[in-house]
Amino acid sequence: MSTARESAVRVGVLFPDLLGTYGDGGNALVLAQRLAWRDISVDLVTVASGTAAPDSCDLYLVGGGEDGPQVQATRELADSRALHRAVDAGAAVLAVCAGMQILGHRFPDATGTERPGLGLLDCDTVRVDRPRAVGELLTTEATAPDPSGGPDLALGVLTGFENHASRTVPGASSTTLAPVEVGEGNGDGTEGVVCGRIVGTYLHGPVLARNPRLADLLLGWVVGPDALTPLDDGEVDTLRAERLRAARSHELAPRRSWRDLLRRS
Amino acid sequence: MAPPPPSLPTRARFAVATGRAVAGASKLVHFGSGSVIGGRAALLVDRDLLRRLTHGRDVVVVSGTNGKTTTTRLIGAALGTDRPVVSNSLGANMAPGIVAALGAADPGATAVLEVDERWVESVLRDTRAGTVVLLNLSRDQLDRTQEVRKLAERWRRALHTNPPARVVANADDPLVAWAAAAAPHVVWVGTGQEWTADAAGCPNCSGRIAFSPGSWRCTACDLARPEPDVTLSDGAISLSGTTVDVALSLPGGVNQVNAAFALATAVALGADPERAAGAVAAVDEVAGRYRVAHIGGHAVRLLLAKNPAGWHEALGMLQPAPAPVVVAINARIADGHDPSWLWDVDYERLDDRFVVATGERRHDLAVRLRYAGVEHSVADDAADAVRAAAAAAGHEPGSVIDLAANYTAFQEYLELVGGPR
């Protein structure tokens, strides 16, 4: 797959109107720009709810969202099975937060009732009697298995922001992205669920803006790693260094002052 | 400052006096205006203080994600043409800020109260407000507030439990329309709403809302856009039976929308439409927004935008390209700790000008601008940012530089130039 592609990379953005609450739409922009900067043509396919999802994309993005819309998105994908067909054909998927939850076997809806997921990721999402996980999330060095059997692919530490009530239990046939250093992640000390070319994560930020190696992992699965010439990620490196420092010092609010608290609490 | 009105019970009078003493002490040690901490102290002395301060008083509650402070100010101006008005005009919009504003007020004054979206339920219970103005609901501070649908549910429940005499509500926002429909009498304001990204899921049935130009309806249940009583076109506001021209001093289409809500409310409360419109048109600054001041040796216009829907409007108010712009982003508790929303803002609209990123989360913004293809630099503080913008190509010497900031960044710069007036 390392030869130049004849056709544009098709990136399917699923239901941003239902699952686009937390800035996850930025992941599509990051992928598109990282391809464009390398002179690889890209076709962003935005799929609104109520329209049929295509099964012909190379890469799919499923974002985070609220409980009600999450159920609606699951219903549409379960009915059409477009994502199932695409995954069977080798498509890559990035599923964030609610997106990861609905790709698993089951997840709780707004009322706490268990709903069947799409069964594409081997994990279960469950209600827990713990506070909502909200804050900076930082992992140790993350890796992802190579779907074609090569050595694990190094992703660096992962940084982002998590905001979820439920927790996710990875199944026996899945791997996780990394142990958690700061924050909650899946809830068992790990973060993320990976099955084949499907990556699930609780990281917002958006995750691909803050973690360019994860973006290039997904793109490498589509265009081959040799096509991914290096990019200038200097501004991202500055941001990552700043967020790592903030997460490690548990500085959720940079320079938060008493004055700030008194003024607006 | 006037003493508390004599009609209040002793405990409430003592509570107000305590609050004022604490606020004064707080102000002396430079903790801001002290109104919030003073209000908290007063509420500790008398938990029922808000109920007592609004007993027998006409109360207007104004809430929504965006436009609360401005609309509250405009309603105050409109009603001020024929009656005394008291207002929490500086944006302290939870119970402590509200009791602080009401503490010394004339008992006959109409209270026009900006109320945080999460506090509508409790403020309505305490004040039994006769008029509730519901502007819009969209994503904001998702790490500390709630999903917008849950807010809509709480509003609906509040209007059902303590029904006001009238609700003035946005017909173009499905979440607001669904919540307001629980009230017995609604004045529907239909001004068009460009930001619809948070309303695709029906609040009534979780079905899908279909938007068409000027209208919307659920594809699964019978929730649909109500027929508006008040509309806006080309600066003219049509109320039932009359149309008034409003030549606003405030910029931007969004302030015409705020003015339509303000006039709809004031006229429903008996104000004369023409006089009210004149008072609304004269307002030129709201809690420091749109003020022109000097920072870093240059004239700067301060603009506030807190969330994607607010930025959508603010980007449209900027001076035309290629005028450079300073954008300042913080992520403190009052802003929300997660600035991922930067990716929901169409900063690509700035691609024909130079942008200087500043604020505590300037590096998040720089990455966002890089992916947006916007030429930019990063500056550590406001003065440096303004100087960098002034040095950029496209800036005409001596002209005003637009500085658009989110909440706590805006507050910080406002303090730099003398604070709210």
Image (spheres, rainbow, N blue to C red):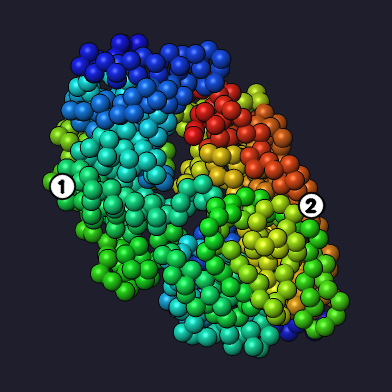
The chain identifier of the residue carrying mark 2 reads A
Foreground of the two, B153 or B74: B153
Q: Is residue A73 left or right of residue B102?
A: right
Foreground of the two, B97 or B391: B97
Mark 2–mark 1 contact, CB under 8 Å? no
Quadrant location of the N terminus of chain B? top left
What element does badge 2 sit on? helix
User: Which image quadrant is residue B20 in?
Assistant: top left
Tell me if residue B280 comes above or below residue A146 in the rendering.
Answer: above
Q: Is residue A165 left or right of residue B83?
A: right
What element does badge 1 sit on? loop
Quadrant location of the C terminus of chain B? top left
Which residue is painted at 36% across and 65% down in the image?
Answer: B202
Q: How many marks?
A: 2
Q: Is residue B341 left or right of residue B214?
A: right
| Residue position for label 2 | A237
* Marks 2 and 1 on same chain: no
Q: Three-letter amino acid code at disc 1?
A: Ser
Residue that sits furthest to the left in the current view: B241
Which residue is painted at 46% across and 51% down in the image?
Answer: B146
Callout 2: few (<14), some (14-19), or many (20+) C-alpha neighbours within 10 Å?
some
| Residue position for label 1 | B240
Q: Residue B390, percent across and down?
A: 66, 33
Tell me if residue A96 comes above or below residue B380 in the rendering.
Answer: below
Q: Residue A105, percent across and down?
A: 56, 78
Q: Three-letter amino acid code at disc 2?
A: Asp
Between marks 2 and 1 in the image, the one whose residue lies nearer the viewer:
2
* Separation of residues labelled 2 and 1 (CA atoms): 58 Å
Residue A211 visible in image: no
